Image: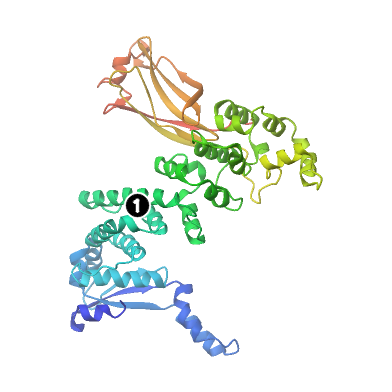
Amino acid sequence: MSQLLDFLLPAEDHDAHLVLVLPPEAAGERARSKARCPFDAKRRKSSKAAIQRRMALPANSTTLKTFSQKFRDWAARWTEGDAREYVVQCRDEAEVATYRQLLAFMHSMAKELPQDPMELLGLLVLAREHAVEAAVMGCVQRLQGQANGLPATACMGLWSALGTGVSGEAAIQAAADKLAEACFDRLCTLVQAEGALQDAVEQRALLQLLGPLQDMLNDERLRKLWRVLPLALLRDCVLEDGNVQADTEATVLAACLHWAEGREGMTTEQLSELLCRIRFPSIPAATLLTYHRTFKGLQLFDPDRELLLRAITAPELWAGLHAAMASDAQSAEAAALKAKCERWWQPREAPLAGQAAPAIFDFKCSKPERAERCVSDAYYWNGYHWSALVAKQGNDVGVFLVCSVGRKHTFQAWGCAPVTHPSAAGREALSWDAFWGDASPYCRDGAVRGRFALSVPKGS
């Protein structure tokens, strides 16, 4: 590929250069190979100078301007006598190769594209950055043809890249959305296979894709991916102590139970493998008891609440329990306890917070067709899911903040009823019809939008 540009255009047609400025670690690789001797100061000095290397790739300005508004804007700033250069910061040597591919695509008039899916992913991202829409579309189309055979790493990289949008053109974005769906379906199939994602690179990509567990719980697609992950991958990768990404232990519990709830054939032993990763004594007592009342998985794991009660009411017993579990002559009780809560007493290297940081969530409630209530999408925060409820109260309207466990089980709500608005006589209650009507001060385009601020009261 490095020599391809010379064959695509006659040398005299190279009237400009794409200049890549490499960071020290990338530009210094070749320089370091020429300055191996630690006693040769002169060669070391030349090595440092070489670190400031600029790589100039020959280009045809007319061709580049044809493919991208960004290149047209760049060229418009040239003045007579200036060097015709497009200067960009380049991250590493791998990106140099991708810039060569981008130039090859444009100089070949959209005929030259790589075959490798990871190279196509890199080219797609770079083409989006430089607004080369034809290259974006070309990469998307080629990847769509490969979607059923893409490896897991490519699926994760593409899903992440495509999720932020790739084009302002409707046709290109629609094709990208279709590819994203195909990548998601392929990834969900791959992760369920026996021995899936055993490679360290694949596991790092999965952790990066999932992100913090509290964010995963607020993303519909990531929740779906989370649900299909096999137990071994959760236990040995995502929930391994050094890999856990979460704000609180309650979030780790919420994520685990989201995975376990409703799963056919779940055994106590499998639940123990999953839940032993959680530091139950670090979860607020009220949260633990609410979860136990709500989730069948926790009831199966600890039918009589014996373990949970020990965790929340007598934490001073943990030292004694730890010693009993470490003993060579374990009692039957200690052995059973160790199997269920192997790591509870071990502090994390990086302890999680006891309470979540304050958060703000925006909600939207659309006008119901026939029902007399509507609920917004739920937002996970601090162990619970929060949503807005707009409900008819007699002839008036009430707006409520609803707190649920596991997105389904409501156990508390706060709100105001009736909803009022200013009038000549002061404030008057709005009727249900007036609340949703065209003249409503709250409803726009058939929906009510608002915002709740969530925080833990001081001293809690």
Q: Position of residue 456 (x, y in %)?
A: 58, 32
Q: Position of residue 59 (x, y in %)?
A: 24, 75
Determine whether 149 is above or below 392 in the image: below
Between 209 and 430, the one nearer to me in the picture: 209
Q: Is residue 76 visible?
A: yes
Between 140 and 450, the one nearer to me in the picture: 140
Q: Residue at x 28, y 52 (%)?
A: 176
Q: Residue at x 21, y 83 (%)?
A: 11
Task: Classify residue 236 as left or right of residue 187.
Answer: right
Q: Position of residue 88 (x, y in %)?
A: 35, 69
Determine whether 378 is above or below 55 in the image: above
Disc 1: CA contacts within 10 A as few (<14), some (14-19) or many (>=20) = many
Residue designated by label 1? 183
Q: Position of residue 102 (x, y in %)?
A: 28, 68
Task: Classify residue 289 as left or right of residue 50.
Answer: right
Q: Quadrant of the N terminus?
A: bottom left
Q: Is residue 83 visible?
A: no
Between 195 and 79, the one nearer to me in the picture: 195
Between 350 and 297, the one nearer to me in the picture: 297
Colouring scheme, one of rainbow, by chain, secondary structure, one colour: rainbow
Q: Quadrant of the C terminus?
A: top right
How many tags in the picture?
Answer: 1
Secondary structure, mark 1, is: helix
Looking at the rendered structure, the kind of residue marked 1 is Cys
Examine the image and state in which quarter residue 140 appears: bottom left
Q: Residue at x 28, y 49 (%)?
A: 178
Determine whether 156 is above or below 278 in the image: below
Determine whether 10 is above or below 252 in the image: below
